[in-house]
Amino acid sequence: MSDTTGRDVIGGIDLSSDAYVIKQSYIRSKYAVEDASGNVVLKGRKKRFKLKEEFPFTDPQGNVVFRIKARNLLDVSGNYALEDEATGEVFAVIEKEFTLFTHVYNVRSPDGVLWARIESESALVMALKSVSGLFGLLPHSYSVVGPNGEVIGSIEERFSLRDVYDVRVGDAGDAPREAIIAAAVAIDALEEN
């Protein structure tokens, strides 16, 4: 793993671009991440009914490149580690904040430095989605905010029968962009939007 200012924090995959598309399959819990040219760069599949939540993301050839791991058994606090498969090292930590209708996640370095906050933008849309599945088709979006409050990216849902998100992350300052993009992908999988 490189230092926090380097881009290569995940061995075996290049997530250094600033735009990706996350597509969930029509069968829940399967994900594909495409680059701007439409090439699949990452795949994921969440396994259901596990006591300690853990699931891998693979390259297009099926090689595991990183895993999301709940930090505790039956993790209700929403704390997850993103672990590089090649080194076994944690390269980012996701912490869910408990709020009434908005969804807020902190993306931190392994030693606790805040890299970004990923926040849902519409409390009304999130509230309607939580009340009834009828509102599941309403697109929603998230802001990716740096540690000093500056907007560094966005996650925008397209109006679609399946979940499709456009992820954009610009200059992330001292934080590795790859870690923030991996966290955005992980959050979509964790929320099962």
Image (cartoon, rainbow, N blue to C red):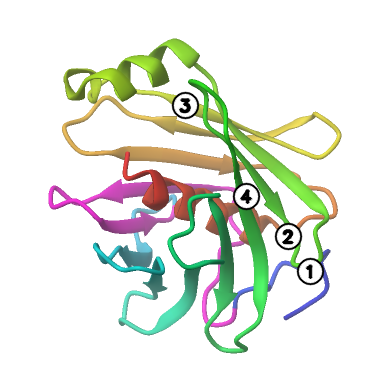
Q: Mark 2 belongs to which amino acid?
A: Pro
Separation of marks 4 and 3 at Cα, in angstroms: 19 Å
First along the sequence among labels 4 and 3: 4
In the image, residue 87 sits, relative to residue 34, either above or below, namely below
| Label 3: which secondary element | strand
The mark found on residue 37 in the picture is: none
Between circles 4 and 3, the one closer to the viewer is: 4
Q: Is residue 177 above or below residue 10?
A: above
The residue that mark 4 highlights is: 95
Q: Amino acid at mark 3?
A: Ser
Location of residue 42 by image quarter: bottom left
- Which residue, given by chain and number where applicable, does mark 1 sit on? 6
Residue 175, horizontal then vertical, whole percent: 78, 55
For discs 4 and 1, the disc positioned in front in the rendered view: 4
Residue extent of the magenta highlight? 11-35
Q: Residues within 10 Å of mark 1 (few under 14, many from 20)?
A: few
The residue labelled by disc 3 is 141
Q: Residue at x 77, y 38 (%)?
A: 146
- Give yes or no for contact between labels 4 and 1 (Cβ–Cβ under 8 Å): no
Q: Viewed as shown, does residue 9 lie left or right of 119? A: right
Residue position marked by numbered label 2 in the rendering: 176
CB-based contact (under 8 Å), mark 2 and mark 3: no
CA distance for labels 4 and 2: 17 Å
Q: From mark 2 to mark 3, how far is it between C-alphas?
A: 22 Å
Observer-nearest residue: 121 or 69?
69
